[in-house]
């Protein structure tokens, strides 16, 4: 059997915060690179990064005549939490100066499997999550680590598509 290469994660993830998308299932290159869109690929710490479906609720509602306690998958639950680096100048400290408070709306657009330096292109498979920011929280200093802050995003199901494709 010929071994099939696995997808290596090293430097193969691009993540952007995009203020607005007209059609979340088909974001355009212009939208994900527009003024106000922020490539956060190198601003996010790999440790404690979580983005995507985290499971679903269980529907446990059998009929009165049912002999068993059947269950079915219900609503999907998403997680979107990450830690960001802090930078020494305001110009470089883009995440801190963008995510200033809770309730900021936008979209997290993630692409995996290609070098993060490669720009978004038509046909790229991406995951799109409509989000609201939580409150930024400064991280407790720990010797030998960079300063940073943690942020939870609250995923809104209406604008989420984990199998979207970048359109023209």
Image (cartoon, rainbow, N blue to C red):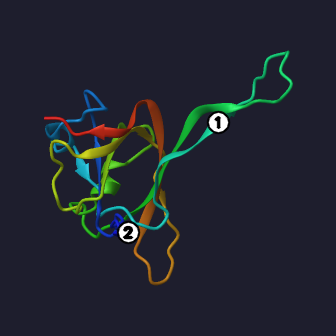
Disc 1 from disc 2: Cα separation: 40 Å
Q: Is residue 67 above or below residue 13?
A: above
Q: Earlier in the sequence, mark 1 or mark 2?
A: 2
Q: Which mark is residue 88?
A: none
Q: Name the residue under label 2.
A: 1
Q: In this view, does 156 lie above or below 122?
A: above
Q: In this view, does 14 lie above or below 69?
A: below
Instruction: Specify whether 151 is left or right of 72.
Output: left
Q: Mark 1 points at which residue?
A: 57
Residue 50 in percent (x, y) is at 48, 55
At 36% from the left and 48% from the top, the residue drawn is: 99
SS at mark 1? strand
Q: In the figure, residue 57 lies in which quadrant? A: top right
Number of marks in the rendered image: 2
At 31% from the left and 38% from the top, the residue drawn is: 164
Residue 96 in percent (x, y) is at 34, 56
Quadrant where the N terminus sits is bottom left
Instruction: Specify whether 49 is left or right of 68.
Output: left
Quadrant where the C terminus sits is top left
At 68% from the left and 34% from the top, the residue drawn is: 58
Residue at the extreme bottom: 144
Residue 75 in percent (x, y) is at 58, 31
Instruction: Specify whether 107 is left or right of 55.
Output: left
Q: In the figure, residue 23 lies in which quadrant? A: top left
Disc 1 crowd rating (10 Å Cα; few below 14, some 14-19, many 20+) is few
Residue at the extreme top: 64
Look at the numbered discs 1 and 2 and tell me whether their residues touch, using CB distance below 8 Å. Answer: no
Along the line of sight, the residue nearer the viewer: 1 or 35: 1
Disc 2 crowd rating (10 Å Cα; few below 14, some 14-19, many 20+) is few
SS at mark 2? loop
């Amino acid at each position: 059997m010929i071994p099939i290469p696995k997808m290596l994660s090293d430097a193969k993830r691009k993540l952007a915060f995009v203020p607005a998308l007209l059609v979340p299932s088909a974001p355009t290159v212009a939208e994900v690179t527009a003024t106000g869109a922020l490539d956060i690929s190198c601003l996010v710490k790999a440790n404690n990064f979580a983005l995507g479906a985290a499971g679903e609720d269980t529907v446990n509602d059998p009929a009165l005549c049912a002999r068993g306690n059947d269950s079915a998958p219900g609503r999907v639950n998403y997680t979107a939490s990450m830690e960001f680096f802090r930078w020494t100048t305001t110009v470089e400290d883009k995440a801190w100066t963008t995510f200033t408070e809770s309730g900021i709306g936008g979209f997290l657009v993630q692409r995996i499997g290609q070098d993060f330096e490669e720009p978004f292109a038509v046909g790229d498979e991406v995951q799109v999550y409509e989000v609201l920011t939580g409150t930024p929280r400064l991280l407790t200093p720990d010797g030998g680590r960079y300063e940073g802050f943690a942020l939870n995003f609250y995923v809104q199901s209406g604008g989420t598509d984990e199998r979207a494709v970048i359109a023209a």
